[in-house]
Image: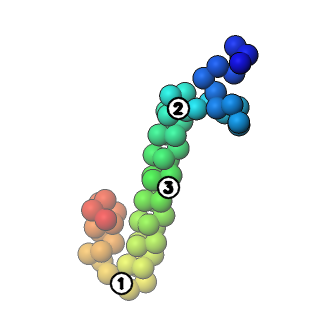
Amino acid sequence: MSRKNRGKDQDTHKSSGRHSVGKRIRANLARNKAEEEDRRKKALREAKKKGDTAGIRAIKRGYY
């Protein structure tokens, strides 16, 4: 094994295990945040459509 590829997955030459954990965590956090944002936007749209003032307030305050 060449020194260059030590600690890499030999099939894909991507770093395996420890190296990529931080990137994976960051990617997951970003994805979760985006999904949550989408969910809140959708809920706000629905609440506005129904004229649910209490629901709108709850969503804006972050209870949803």
Q: Nearer the viewer, residue 24 or 14?
A: 14
Mark 2 surroundings within 10 Å by alpha-carbon count, few (fewer than 14), some (14 through 19), many (20 or more): few
Element type at marker 2? helix
Q: Nearer the viewer, residue 23 or 1?
A: 1
Q: Nearer the viewer, mark 1 or mark 3?
A: 3
Could you tell me residue 24's position as x and y percent? 52, 40
Above/below status of 58 relative to 16: below
Are the two marked residues, 2 and 1, in contact with CB atoms closer than 8 angstroms? no
Residue at left offset 44%, top offset 66%: 39
Q: Marks 1/3: CA distance? A: 25 Å
Q: State which tag comes first along the sequence, 1 or 3.
A: 3
Are the two marked residues, 2 and 3, in contact with CB atoms closer than 8 angstroms? no
Above/below status of 19 relative to 36: above
> Can you identify the residue that label 1 sits on?
51
Could you tell me residue 42's position as x and y percent? 46, 72
Q: Relative to 11, is 36 on the left or the right? A: left
Q: State which tag comes first along the sequence, 2 or 1.
A: 2
Residue at left offset 47%, top offset 40%: 25
Residue at left offset 53%, top offset 32%: 17
- Mark linked to residue 17: 2
- Mark linked to residue 34: 3
Identity, as a three-letter code, of the amino acid under mark 3: Ala
Residue 14 quadrant = top right
